[in-house]
Image (spheres, rainbow, N blue to C red):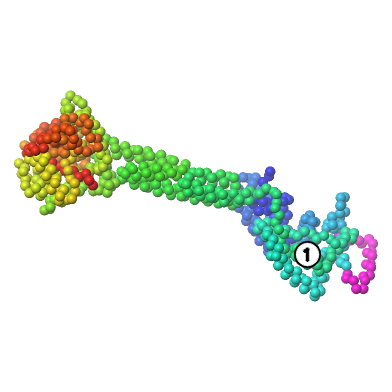
Amino acid sequence: MAQDLYSELLGIPPGPRPPNHYQLLGLRTFESDTHAIHEAVLRQTARLKRWELHPDPEFARRVQEMLNEVNGAGAILQDHATKEPYDVELAWTLGVPLSALEAPAAEKRPQVPLRRRPSPEAPHPLRLEEEAEAAEPAPEPPPAPPRAAPEPTGPSLRAAAADLLRRRWAWGLLAAALILAIWLPFALRRPAPEPQSPPKLPPPPTPAHKEEGTIKPRVGSRDLVSTVIKAAEPEPPKAEPTAPTPAQAAAAAYPAFKLGVEKLEKESRYGDAMSACTQFMKAHSSTREAEAALAVLNDLRKKLDSIRDDHAGRFKRAVEKGDLKRARDVIAELARYKAGEVSEDLDHMRSQATATEKRFTQWPFDEVTAKWRQRIAAEAHRLAIEMDVDLGDGVKMTLVLIPPGSFVMGSDPGARTPQAEQPAHKVTFAKPFYMGKHEVTQRQWEALMRGNPSKFKHADRPVECVSWDDCRGFLTQLNKRTGRTFALPSESEWEYACRAGASTAYCFGNKEADLPDFAWFVHNSGNTTHPVGTRKPNAWGLHDMHGNVWEWCEDVWHTTYDDAPKDGSAWCTGGVQARRASRGGSWNFVPDSCRAAFRGGAYATARSYFAGCRIVLREL
């Protein structure tokens, strides 16, 4: 079935094609107002201009032909010389009496006797031809009765109505007819016609008298009133069994389509919503509803772009802060928006999160990554990388933030590996903690304990000659003053903080030749302790993790790591309860004893001038 462009582009109801000039311009049949005809030409031309540049050449050609038809129709109807013949021809085609023509010039033309046009089938009552009978003289009309009303000789009902209106009493009848025409539609409660359909002309009145092809309408008052009323009141719309036009089908389908898209958007199914828009546009192309669906599609794309940008920004901030849990939550939240456009973003985010998580949990790692982890942990937990603790009298102790992570504690089996360092096992710290930047100095010890048991007296040297029990007494006073819970480090905390990402013998590598830059030991100490912080720190900023003095740990001494905790906590069950572990070596020990994995131990009550302590803070 060919596409009906008259109906789709100009809204012309289904019917004969091509439509007549009045239907083509959307005008009332036999419209005589020149201004209205001109406005109709401009309106229909503007509607067709929208489709003039259509990509389909055949469609564009048909639109151009329709433009030519509109302009030609306007030229004919705006010129009285061409309009009148066209109206007469159209009236015969539609079966409408010539009295329905509204051209003013028709009233001024001389009346010419009309005869029916001969037809092989049946004579049409309205198709008349003018014949001038010059050959023979016309017979004189018979004399009219003295008091009878003259019978109309012309075929026009308008002439009879004009003659009737010259009488005064006819004006009263006309006024009554107009009032009745206004009141009667409301009384009958007839539904109004469809706004888009053109008004229909009333059916032609049945002629009351026929005489040799000449129409003789009755001009009684009752017939005149009925004619005026029928011409004034609109006819009720009639149901047409024909199929709806594409424009009508699109208008009917659009509300359900809009509700479906809103439901899909509410369920975050943006991919399905966009697909529905595309399908609707394909099914109802070249309609206003298709343009509205395109606007809905563009709005969905803008919303989805905004959602993607928001999640990308949140994900980037989470990764920069090292908050991998929040980054994973952003990925899961974005995955709820089921659309093809976000799949590529999700793949990129997942790969970036996996790479960041690997970088954040892998071990060993270099000094740059160690400092990055420390900064990320500080930002994620809103903590300072370094924290000062006030001990009173202007004395302070500095702590350094140790980020969470994993490492392998101990040493692999070997010919020179002590049994106490085996087996090597993985330990994971879920939370960050603080550790003293230096060993506890004699100045700090005196600020709380009011005494100094050290052999090598100096305010900035590490305190020594203190037992494990003495260190517990120092922590009791420190906690009482600060209201916090400080403690000695566990062995796993000490080794994790000492290595700072390294898997080598020392925090800086395996070369003993570099040890003097980081530690005071038997080869460079001169048989004495030295002020803290005078050697290089490790990657996390901790000084003297190798040498100077042994550092007591909280763990009970165990001869091996069998069944050792893997969460970083102190191992205080089993083992030799009277002995406690110590780490780091001291000023009078060889380089091998200063290794990160080397373990020492002594009785909790023992005091020596090569053992001191360092503190940690776990509850942040």
Write down the region rendered in magenta: 130-150
Query: Is 138 part of what is drawn in magenta?
Result: yes
Query: Is 275 part of what is drawn in magenta?
Result: no
- Amino acid type of the residue tagged 1 in the rendering: Thr
Dividing the picture into quadrants, the one containing residue 468 is top left
Quick check: 88 above or below 464?
below
The answer to which of 443 and 320 lies nearer the viewer is: 443
Residue 296 visible in the picture: yes
Q: Position of residue 560 (x, y in %)?
A: 18, 30
Q: Quadrant of the N terminus?
A: top right
Q: Residue at horizontal 84%, vertical 65%?
A: 218
Residue 177 as seen in the image, left or right of residue 353: right
Which residue extends farthest top? 415
Q: Residue at horizontal 52%, vertical 44%?
A: 275
SS for callout 1: helix
Q: Residue at horizontal 66%, vertical 57%?
A: 194
- The secondary structure that dominates the magenta segment is loop
Quick check: 442 above or below 574?
below
Determine which residue is flagged by label 1: 227
Q: Position of residue 325 (x, y in %)?
A: 33, 43
Q: Residue at horizontal 6%, vertical 45%?
A: 452
Residue 495 as seen in the image, left or right of residue 549: right
Q: Position of residue 289 (x, y in %)?
A: 58, 51
Residue 37 visible in the picture: no
Residue 98 as seen in the image, left or right of residue 272: right
Dividing the picture into quadrants, the one containing residue 497 is top left
